[in-house]
Image: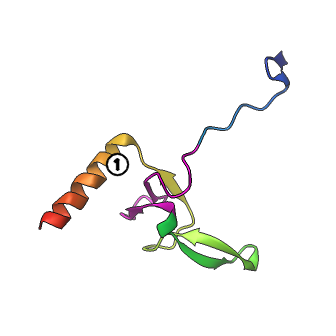
Amino acid sequence: MIGPGGFMAAPKAAERPTYNTAPIRCGRLKCKWRGYEGELVGLPSKKFGAGVTDKVCPDCGKNEYCFMTSREIAAWERRKEEGCAA
């Protein structure tokens, strides 16, 4: 199929925010950790060897994360403010 991008052009990748600026959450559903990419812990990779590090959740050790939605960010900030006030 020929389109505006050329023959069989791949769709553009979704733009991601710059590193350590957008709030993230752990990819494991039961884990409650929220934070930024810079707060992830670097561990030696089991898949690629000791020369490569994986960034994992500081609470559960999962190697996946998701960017939070605006509603999740609002709830996360509310909880942080309540924790500081108590």
Give how far across and how far down residue 29 sits, in percent.
42, 58
Give how far across and how far down residue 22 sits, in percent.
46, 51
Q: Is residue 6 above or below residue 70?
A: above
Looking at the image, residue 17 sits to the left or right of residue 5; the answer is left
Quarter of the figure that contains the N terminus? top right
Looking at the image, residue 38 sits to the left or right of residue 46; the answer is left
Q: Residue at x 80, y 23 (%)?
A: 5
Residue neighbourhood size for the residue with mark 1, other residues' Cα within 10 Å, grouped as few (<14), some (14–19), many (≥20): some
Q: Is residue 36 magenta?
A: yes
Looking at the image, residue 48 sits to the left or right of residue 61; the answer is right
Residue 69's quadrant in the figure?
top left
Q: Is residue 70 above or below residue 25?
A: above
What coloring was used for the rendering?
Answer: rainbow
Which element type, helix, strand or loop, lies under badge 1? helix
Give how far across and how far down residue 54 sits, in percent.
63, 71
Quarter of the figure that contains the C terminus? bottom left
Residue behind mark 1: 73
Looking at the image, residue 26 sits to the left or right of residue 19; the answer is left
Q: Residue at x 72, y 31 (%)?
A: 11
Q: Amino acid at mark 1?
A: Ile
Q: Which residues are magenta?
A: 16-37
Question: Could you tell me what secondary structure mostly forms the magenta stretch?
Answer: loop
Q: Residue at x 56, y 50 (%)?
A: 18
Q: Nearer the viewer, residue 44 or 77?
A: 77
Q: Is residue 13 magenta?
A: no
Give how far across and how far down residue 63 sits, in percent.
57, 66
Q: Nearer the viewer, residue 1 or 80?
A: 80
